[in-house]
Amino acid sequence: KEQCRGGAIYRNASLDTQVEVFTEGVMNFLDPSRKFIESATHPLPVRPQDRPFCLCVTFNLPHGVGTGNMQLRPSDDELYKSAYRDRFDEMPLPKTYRAWSSIRQPRLPRHVYNGIYLPQYDYVKEPYFLRERQVRTCQTITGIDRFVGLLMEKLEELNLAGNTIIVFSTDHGLHHGEHGLGGKCFLYEEDTHIPLIIYDPRLPEHRRGQVIDRFALVPDLAPTVLELCGITPPSTMQGRSLRPLMHGEDVNWRTEFMTEQLMDIQNYPRSESLRTERWKYIRYFKRTEDPAQEGFLFRGTLDDYITCLYSTVEDEEPVYEELFDLENDPWEEHNLCLDQHPPAILDELRERLNRHIRDRLPANSPATVPLSSS
């Protein structure tokens, strides 16, 4: 409680439990007053004048904990009262949306995923509740957009706008009923394809506003920021700087990458994938069993964490596979592995993913420190 209340983001919070603090953050965030923006930008005016600065503003919104507890207040301006709510019935459902009541054949087999997810994602089950959440999501995203605008104003006020880089991204995507699924931690595009906007006011005019159709990964952010600030990224960093792409340089760039989700707490399936410019191959592994938590709907801990992470490296065999031709099936609706004659590239993708798995292993096992039972 104290850590949550004393954190830099929530130092103005008057409540001390996480849900209440998040709820208060939502209210402050949407408040036309500048309470939240002034709190977040407070370090800027007093920063050392002869040194660079890094300001990190981390939103919980539009996370379900925040949007699920939102309530309208009389003081909210008209945007949050009507701009989206008066178009409730026009809120579009995802192209591959499947209501819970219409599902006859689950997307994934039961021995891979039992179809049960956290109750906080129940809103995806029926169109009415999904549209209600979409309204709230649009409201909070508009609030974030306003926040960015206020932040830009503050930078202008401090004469910092012309030499300040802004990076906007998020941690993961989310299923809103696509394929009949709710929640996160699947390896479909809805969860793995996230926004990334890099604003550098020093870029030449003709390079601004460009959309770069290359694979960027989360580990790329750190070396990118360093290089944009004139610092050579250390060779130990796993990612690559995006600066050459931003400047239109012809560089040899990645054409594929792997993703993984190997922890099955909260019932998510254990899986690994290889994504190329055209293909996505996903393989799933049998759910791990923890006798100590038998009978619990959701596993609260992961006692076999190391087993989950390393079992696939040690040649654990997958129990289900998917292959999608993203060029002709961008919504990942047709699993080519179920065809009588899957594409010949399937075997090649399997081996390429195996190479990625092997390459991720460190030269030496990480150091471990035994913990006292007390």
Image (cartoon, rainbow, N blue to C red):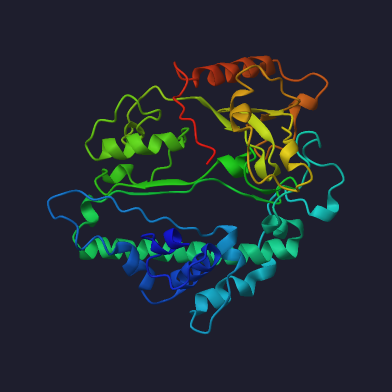
Q: Can residue 191 be seen in this view?
A: yes
Along the viewing direction, whichever of 3 and 107 lies nearer the viewer: 3
Q: Position of residue 76 (x, y in %)?
A: 49, 79
Q: Which residue is drawn at 62% across and 42% down?
A: 185
Along the viewing direction, whichever of 367 and 347 lies nearer the viewer: 367
Residue that extends furthest to the right in the rendered view of this protein:
104
Figure disc tally: 0
> In the drawing, does residue 101 fall left or right of residue 93?
right
In this view, 53 is above or below 253? below
Residue 67 image-quadrant placement = bottom right
In this view, 89 is above or below 351? below
Q: Which residue is drawn at 25% across and 30% down?
A: 232
Q: Position of residue 282 (x, y in %)?
A: 66, 29
Q: Where is residue 221 in the image (x, y as percent from the top left)?
A: 38, 39
> In the drawing, does residue 277 fall left or right of residue 337?
left
Along the viewing direction, whichever of 26 and 141 lies nearer the viewer: 26
